[in-house]
Amino acid sequence: RLLGVDSSLMRLPNEKELGEVFGWQECSNQRGSTGTAYPEARLSVLYDLLNGIGLDTRLESSRLGEVALAIEQLAGVRRDDVVINDRGFSGYLYFAWVLHQQGHLVSRCSSASFLTAQELFRRNRANMSRIVWLHALPTQKSECQRLGLPLKIKVRFVSLRLPTGELEVLATS
């Protein structure tokens, strides 16, 4: 299967009970806080891209980050599924979870992500490829060990030129 996962923040009806469950978002402008707030939730979907089916949909507190929520949803990934992700999901823990589920990944990288991706962006050349071993950060090692995740993973970084002329760097297993 070809899967994708992403989330959005949702403004909820201004009800006290919803704010208590999902959290409140302060309104602000160029002068700072306006003194008003509204309930806000995070909606995340693990999606079967080829069949147009949501496999796991969650509505959670807006305080829960999109990557942490997506990692929970990776329990739905099966052996040999390919998970395609946007820039916000190109981190070691996320990659390790996909591989732990025996899936494969293709993730867009930001120019500030992994050192290898930064190097490919600096070179600004398409059709380059580098295979590297990524290591869990020191701050992630105990969590990886607790969760049974590998402390190092092999990833290929590939650069390509989009029709717009923009350089894209992908990380893939």
Image: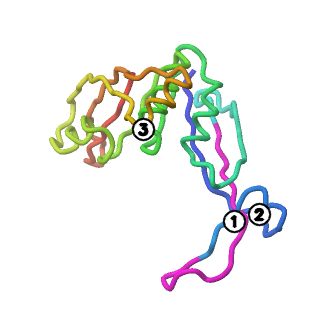
Q: Earlier in the sequence, mark 1 or mark 3?
A: 1
Q: Main secondary structure of the magenta part?
A: strand
Q: Residue at x 64, y 25 (%)?
A: 75
Circle 1 sits on which residue?
24
> How far across and how far down the image is residue 93, in percent?
47, 32
- The percent position of residue 57, horizontal first and vertical second, equals 71, 39
Amino acid, disc 1: Trp
64 lies above or below 171:
below
| Left or right side of 163 for 119 | left
Quadrant position of residue 107: top left
Label 1 to label 3: alpha-carbon separation: 30 Å
Residue 118: quarter of image: top left
Q: CA distance from mark 2 to mark 1?
A: 5 Å
Task: Determine the residue positioned at 21% across, 35% down.
Answer: 126
Q: Secondary structure at mark 1?
A: strand
Foreground label between 1 and 3? 3
Q: Are marks 3 and 2 in contact (CB under 8 Å)?
A: no
Label 3 neighbour load within 10 Å: few <14, some 14-19, many 20+: few
Give the amino acid at mark 3.
Thr
Residue 25 spot, x, y in % from top left: 65, 67
Camera-near label (3 vs 2) is 3
Horizontal placement of 129 versus 39: left or right? left
CB-based contact (under 8 Å), mark 2 and mark 1: yes
Q: Which mark is residue 16?
A: none
Q: Is residue 27 left or right of residue 132?
A: right
| Nearest to N terminus: mark 3 or mark 2 | 2
Magenta-drawn stretch contains 160: no
Amino acid type, mark 2: Gly
Give the Cα distance between marks 3 and 2. Answer: 32 Å
Disc 2 target residue = 19
Q: Is residue 2 above or below residue 65?
A: above
Looking at the rendering, the stretch of residues picked out in magenta corresponds to 28-45
